[in-house]
Amino acid sequence: QVQLAESGGGEVRPGGSLRLSCSISGRTGRMGWFRQAPGKEREVVASINTSIRTGRTYYADSVKGRFTISQDNDKNTVYLQMDSLKPEDTAMYYCAGRKFGVSYEEIRWKDLWTYHYWGRGTQVTVAP
């Protein structure tokens, strides 16, 4: 049974940075970071194919150029480096993963239903 555990959330001022970590127990395919703000639907932030060492990455338009998703295969961990944070980035951030060997069309990198494993989330608050 694959388990995901997020860490690294916290409170930061606008313009600040945080790095989220997702520790993975087990083997997964594509990994993603999602977020959900109060009263809003869960949305994709970034995704990476961890099945290969240099996995292809995708980003939501709202975070392009500010967030970076990466992987450390030796540590079985996926990171989300968040720079130039804005108040609208405030949300609960979730790590998600697909079953290893299960693939979909590339365009579905942002579809929640294609991810089979979910962590419990870590809160990120961006406020003055």
Image (spheres, rainbow, N blue to C red):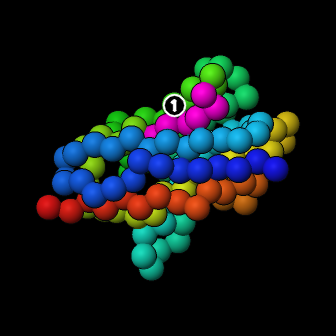
Quadrant position of the C terminus in the picture: bottom left
| Residue positioned 56% across, 29% down in the render | 71
Question: Which residue occupies the extreme right position in the image?
Answer: 101
Inspect the image, locate mark 1, and give the three-letter code of the amino acid beneath it: Ser
Q: Does the stretch in magenta take in 37?
A: no
Q: Nearer the viewer, residue 73 or 101?
A: 73
| In the image: residue 113, left or right of residue 83 | right
Q: Is residue 86 above or below residue 16?
A: below
Write down the quadrant of residue 11 in the picture: bottom left
Q: How many marks?
A: 1
In the rendered image, residue 106, in percent from the top left (x then y), is placed at 70, 39
In the rendered image, residue 20, in percent from the top left (x then y), is placed at 44, 44
Q: Residues within 10 Å of mark 1 (few under 14, many from 20)?
A: many
| Residue positioned 43% across, 69% down in the render | 37
Question: Which residue occupies the extreme left position in the image?
Answer: 128
In the rendered image, residue 90, in percent from the top left (x then y), is placed at 34, 62
* SS for dot 1: strand
The residue labelled by disc 1 is: 70
Write down the quadrant of residue 125 in the picture: bottom left
Is most of the magenta stretch helix, strand or loop?
strand
| Residue positioned 77% across, 36% down in the render | 27
In the image, the segment drawn in magenta is 75-80
| Residue positioned 46% across, 40% down in the render | 80
| In the image: residue 74, left or right of residue 91 | right
In the rendered image, residue 15, in percent from the top left (x then y), is placed at 19, 47
Q: Nearer the viewer, residue 100 or 3?
A: 3
Q: Is residue 44 visible?
A: no
Q: Is residue 27 visible?
A: yes
